[in-house]
Amino acid sequence: MQQFSVTKTSLFPSQKNRALLQTVLEVSDLHVSFPVYGAEPIAAVRGVSLAFAQGEVVGLVGESGSGKTVLARAIMGLVPPPGRVIQGRVLFEGRDIGEMSEDEMRNVRGREISMVIPNPRSELNPLLRVGKQIASVAKYHLDIGWAEAERMAEDMLRKVAIPDPKRRFESYPHELSGGMAQRVVLANALICSPKFIISDDATSGLDVTIQAQVLDLMRNLVREHNTSTLFITRDIGITAHFCDRVAVIYAGAIVEMAKRETFFENPCHPYTIMLLAAFSHNPRLRRQWFKEGIRFKPSELGTACPFAPRCVRVHDRCRHEERPALHEIDPGHFVRCYFPVER
Ligand SMILES: Nc1ncnc2c1ncn2[C@@H]1O[C@H](COP(=O)(O)OP(=O)(O)OP(=O)(O)O)[C@@H](O)[C@H]1O
Ligand code: SF4
Ligand SMILES: [Mg+2]
């Protein structure tokens, strides 16, 4: 397999298809770390580069603690202190998010970039009727009057498939089921037709049937509005239905990224295959790719391949050389591994 280095122009899966599309958001070599008193800082995000074309849905898959939320928050300009971006940048429509003032950022958040998180109740004000909450987002960002904002909010409740939207407009959050509350949060996130949306494990608290409904709805709405999306999940299976492109993150770094079809037909990184094997009903496959009992610890990263202790293909080189770089093994297919699986 021929190997190429990652270049700025090769971040998209298909040059031919994507070249003419506008890049809405671009993350370049982003590093985020958390200082730890008396110890090495925790490197939560380590050199992530990812660009989103208009309307493109990119799935980001990785287990707990791999850096998904920290990356999402860095994109929103909201890294929780004492964490900070120590290198790299996020460009939204060519503007550097790190250089925007708090006022500029407030206008961007909610209006142009918005985020949906798993616990809808923490997002909603328990004392305000849900219709009013959605309408106030529109009023604040779009500079419109109450009547227009409320009309938009009711329309949005209809779009997120809330039954009897007129009546639900007047409900308080505690009167809604979890699935309905998540739809309201989605309505809040989409009311201003943002150009970029982040869904951070947004449906993980819902039961499976409701989760599927909310996901379907989200997919239809982002397609309809041509919204670029970062779709974060721990469930690699969901990305097969939802995303144009899939990236796998391990220990704060992307280890594999490809167009959805390539990703599922030809996964190459041992960690990707391990995640896929976890979903398989074939116990032999699971045994083949799993090393039991070893978990990733962010405080024990080292400088070599961080997946080495768990990798069934590990060689001496993996333990002793620098962490492998991300290579483009086929056009648009990137892998960070010295010994990618070849088919
Ligand atoms: N506020 C914080 N203070 C210190 N370290 C943090 C903080 N937030 C995150 N981290 C570190 O960053 C790493 C990545 O955390 P992050 O929340 O991004 O994981 P995640 O991939 O979103 O996990 P999950 O799937 O459980 O949501 C964690 O392992 C943790 O060590
Ligand atoms: S570099 Fe080595 S240890 Fe790391 S994922 Fe590849 S084969 Fe496994
Ligand atoms: Mg998270």
Image (cartoon, rainbow, N blue to C red):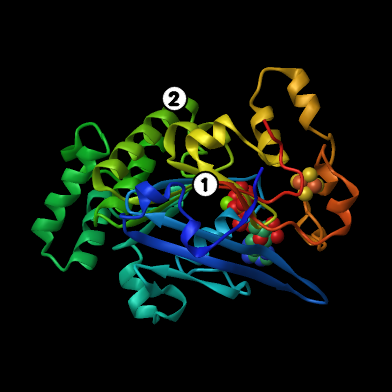
Numbered tag placed on residue 209 in the rendering: 2
Kindly tell me whether mark 2's CB lies below 8 Å from ligand 1. Answer: no
Label 1 CB less than 8 angstroms from ligand 2: no
Question: Does 101 appear above or below 273?
Answer: below
Give above or below for 1 relative to 73: above
Task: Decide which of 11, 203 is in the foreground and name it.
Answer: 11
Q: Quadrant of the N terminus?
A: top right
- Quadrant assignment for the C terminus: top right
Secondary structure beneath dot 2 equals helix
Callout 1 environment at 10 Å: few (<14), some (14 to 19), or many (20+)?
Answer: some
Label 2 Cα neighbours within 10 Å, binned few <14 / some 14-19 / many ≥20? few
- Residue sitting at x 87%, y 45%: 315
* Closer to the camera in the image, 326 or 271: 326
Q: Amino acid at mark 2?
A: Thr
N-terminal of the pair, mark 1 or mark 2, is: 2
Residue depicted at x 83% and y 51%: 318
Name the residue beneath numbered marker 1.
Answer: 331
Q: Is residue 156 visible?
A: yes
Please name which of the two marks, 1 or 2, marks the residue nearer to the observer: 1
Q: Secondary structure at mark 1?
A: loop
Q: Percent position (x, y) of residue 269?
A: 68, 41
Query: Residue at position x 65%, y 22% from top?
Result: 280
Residue type at tag 1: Pro
**In this view of the protein, which residue sits in the foreground, 94 or 122?**
94
51 and 119: which is toward the camera: 51
Measured from the top left, where is residue 97 in percent x and y? 43, 73
Q: Relative to residue 320, is residue 328 drawn left or right?
A: left
User: Residue at 37% of width from left, 51% of height from top?
Assistant: 18
The answer to whether residue 54 is above or below residue 145 is above
Asked if residue 156 lies left or right of residue 311, the reply is: left
